[in-house]
Amino acid sequence: MGKEDRFLDGKTCKELKRILGPHQLKLDWETRVCYGYDATNQLFVPHAVCFPEDTSQVSRILELASAKRIPVVPRGAGSGFTGGALPVQGGLVLSTERMNRILSISQEDLVAVVQPGVVTGVFQKVVSGMGLFYPPDPASQDFSTLGGNVAECAGGMRALKYGVTRDYVLGLEVVLPTGSIVRTGGRTVKNVVGYDLTRLMVGSEGTLGIITEITLKLIPLPEARRTVLVFFPSIKTASLAVTKIFSQGVLPSAMELVDRACLDCVAQSKPVRFPAETAAMLLVEVDGSRLSVEEQAAKVAHVCHGLGSLELQVSQDEAQAESLWSMRKAISPALARIRPHRLNEDVVVPRSLLPEAMERFSKIGEQWGVPVTAFGHAGDGNIHVNVLYDRSDPQEAQRAEKAAEAVMRATVELGGSLSGEHGIGTTKARFLSLEIHPQALELMCAIKTLLDPKGILNPGKIFPQRGKGAPA
Ligand SMILES: Cc1cc2nc3c(=O)[nH]c(=O)nc-3n(C[C@H](O)[C@H](O)[C@H](O)COP(=O)(O)OP(=O)(O)OC[C@H]3O[C@@H](n4cnc5c(N)ncnc54)[C@H](O)[C@@H]3O)c2cc1C
């Protein structure tokens, strides 16, 4: 019997169709290929793709999958950077795209209830139209889903001031791998009754349960924002500015650091202008009342001038702010001009060690002979380190792997974390033990086994596979 038959024989397909109806289960090759990739650019074709429309269907699918030991992989938009939505052992991909309704928004309670397949950016527009604010802003917000954001605990540029996805999740409805439906948390900001199962589920990368409903906290929309763009002659002064801005009592809503290599790259595809001696760019956004943003922007400018900045621009309206941010947003796609492939690490270091980290990452690139660029959320120490390479050159690809590993080791040595936003998935699993203590890892494995005794939910993720640990 082939692998395909083992997972999905005629009887199982029939049962799945009975649960889902004839149009919500796809077995054709084209659909399976389309749901077999994510932003890592890898492809694992599942045996089938299903599109449940409600919690009861999800529950019955998992009950069946559990009985027949069929791997099930939850999937939002497939924009993950670490392979979380890849069906690495085949089986069934469960897409949440038909569970995409905003169920309720309460302006009095500042709470919204949504299904997992709602696109983050769509939700943000709807609530902002009501004068409300949902701050988590992954750069993928135009296509990633709230379910995927919760499963990865997505962050973004505004995490510095407003926190990450976990800070906005008040409650969840989750279907466990056995099919049982669990509700966690509630609708209130304060709630300390029992263990915090909501936090356990947030960031669990689709390995503990399938999120079928999310209760989110909202806040009032700030009245105004100002963006300050500054160029510095060294990474060190730009990094120093980050800490000095805080010491002036300013907590920006975003603070992004970009190195010269990234700026040069953007300049190849976009008409951007910066002083020749530039080594780093800092982009700072402040928000609040109209009066307070003027005051905060003036303080930021004062700090940067004091540190010898080369040039400084302050946005006067929304259009100007967007134009200043467009340079930052153009970096990721522009990097492909240097090399077609990249290992995209999102390491975090203690803020005070940012200058040292940036220097070490750049030296690692020189040491392994591959371009290494760094940009990202300087305000919270979360830097996107991109090791660039060309897969068609196997030696360069091997050196890139070594450089990426060196970046992770350096990060842990500096007291940092392997991932601030993107999670572990498959791509970082072998490095987990660099950061997580053996006893904590054992506890995590025990929790996984308790909730998923047959190991059917998103197998092959987070935990190192046998014999695939990080080299000592
Ligand atoms: C251009 C680009 C920019 C990005 N920028 C950022 C950024 O700034 N910040 C950031 O944090 N990330 C960023 N990402 C990564 C990615 O967008 C996030 O991880 C996002 O949260 C994934 O959402 P998704 O809907 O695409 O989930 P998917 O990729 O489909 O899935 C991600 C993980 O969540 C699980 N999952 C999905 N839905 C559910 C569910 N309902 N229940 C349980 N598990 C589920 C999957 O099994 C998988 O493990 C970026 C990606 C791209 C391509």
Image: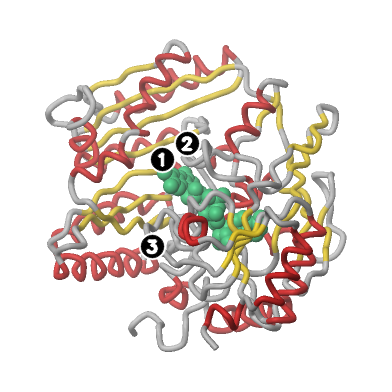
Q: Is residue 103 left or right of residue 287?
A: right
Q: Which label belongs to residue 42? A: 3
Residue positioned 40% across, 36% down in the render: 244
Q: Is residue 35 above or below residue 279?
A: below
- Asked whether 344 or 384 is in front, the reply is 344
The image shows residue 357 at horizontal and vertical percentages of: 31, 56
Q: Which residue does the numbered mark 2 point to in the structure image?
A: 246
Q: Is residue 53 left or right of residue 79?
A: right
Looking at the rendered image, the quarter that the N terminus falls into is bottom right
Q: Secondary structure at mark 3?
A: loop
N-terminal of the two: label 3 or label 2?
3
Tag 1 and tag 2, C-beta contact below 8 Å: yes
- Asked whether 67 or 434 is in front, the reply is 67
N-terminal of the two: label 1 or label 3?
3
Residue positioned 41% across, 67% down in the render: 427
Closest to the camera, between mark 3 and mark 2, is 3
- Asked whether 230 or 121 is in front, the reply is 121
Q: Secondary structure at mark 2?
A: helix
Tag 3 and tag 2, C-beta contact below 8 Å: no
| Colouring mode (rainbow / by chain / secondary structure / one colour) | secondary structure
- Is any part of residue 203 visible from this angle? no
Q: Is residue 50 above or below residue 138?
A: below
Near mark 2 (Cα within 10 A), the count class, few <14, some 14-19 or many ≥20, is few
Q: Which residue does the numbered mark 1 point to in the structure image?
A: 243
Label 1 to label 3: alpha-carbon separation: 39 Å
Tag 1 and tag 3, C-beta contact below 8 Å: no
